[in-house]
Each structure stands twice: as structure tokens, then as C-alpha cells.
Amino acid sequence: MPENENNQLNDAREFDKLFTDDDIPELFTDDDIPTFKTTGEAIRFGEHATEKELDQLFQRRRNLLRQFDIFMAQDELDGASIVITQAQFCREAIEVRRKKRHTVWRCLCD
């Protein structure tokens, strides 16, 4: 394995150590929405999200983006990367739900 790829793999492992289940209660308070660890998990959740869960995803994403700004202002890059990744997962779950809703609407109108 080239040294650059090896360094990236080590960086990824170090990042994974930063995000533990112990961090979750501080970042998220809504019990209906799981904490996503992959894009696939977010997409699968979004495909079947209820309107209530979709609203919670919007709220969680908004809160995460606010927390990101705070971390960046404090030059806390590790925390910023964790919350922006979670915000991205929320966005992916929201988008898949929107696309599904749009597709159903188009089928009904055609």
C-alpha cells in the first residue's frame, strides 16, 4: 500500500475513535432518529421516514450546522468534522425522502 493511502487509512481510524456512542447524548436529543454511521444507513432511514421524523431530521440538521459554526469559531476541528458529517447524513436522509415523495406525486399527476 502506498504511504499516502496508509496515512489516509490511519487518519480515518483516528477519526472513528473520536466519534463514540458516548458523544451521542450531547449532540442529539430526539429519540426517534438514529445516529447514522454511513450514508447507506441514512438513505435507508430516509426512504421510510414519517413526516414527524422528517421534521426531526430538519431540526437536527439545523442544530448540527449551528454547532459546526461554534466548533469552527473555537478552532475545534475534530468536533466540527463530526457534526458536519452528521449534518450531511441528515441531508441525505431528507433528500431521499423528498425524491420519493416527488416521484409519487409525479405518478399521481401523469
Image: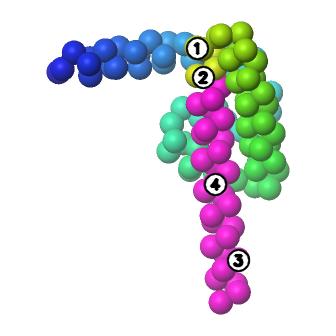
Image quadrant holding the N terminus, namely top left
- Which of the marked residues, 3 or 2, is nearer the chain's N terminus? 2
Residue visible at 65% across and 10% down in the picture: 75
Residue at label 4?
95
- Which of the marked residues, 1 or 3, is nearer the chain's N terminus? 1
Q: Disc 2 marks which amino acid?
A: Ile
Task: Tell me if label 2 and label 1 are in contact, CB under 8 Å.
Answer: yes
Residue visible at 66% across and 58% down in the picture: 97
- Which of the marked residues, 2 or 4, is nearer the chain's N terminus? 2
Q: Disc 1 marks which amino acid?
A: Asp
Residue visible at 63% across and 64% down in the picture: 99
Left or right: 80 as drawn, with respect to 53: left
Residue at label 2?
82
Task: Tell me if label 1 and label 3 are in contact, CB under 8 Å.
Answer: no
- Which of the marked residues, 3 or 4, is nearer the chain's N terminus? 4
Q: Disc 3 marks which amino acid?
A: Trp
Spatial distance from mark 3 to mark 2, Cα to Cα? 35 Å
Residue at label 1?
78
Assess disc 4: are there few (<14), some (14-19) or many (≥20) residues with their C-alpha within 10 Å of its C-alpha.
some
Q: Secondary structure at mark 1?
A: helix
Assess disc 1: are there few (<14), some (14-19) or many (≥20) residues with their C-alpha within 10 Å of its C-alpha.
few
Magenta span of residues: 82-110
Please state the horizontal and vertical placement of residue 62, each as a whole percent of the image: 78, 36
In this view, the residue in front, 50 or 27, is 27
Spatial distance from mark 2 to mark 4, Cα to Cα? 20 Å
Residue 101 vertical position relative to residue 9 in the rendered view, above or below: below
Residue at label 3?
105
Please state the horizontal and vertical placement of residue 68, each as a whole percent of the image: 70, 24
Q: Main secondary structure of the magenta part?
A: helix
Residue 18 vertical position relative to residue 67 in the rendered view, above or below: above
Left or right: 28 as drawn, with respect to 82: right
Spatial distance from mark 3 to mark 4, Cα to Cα? 15 Å
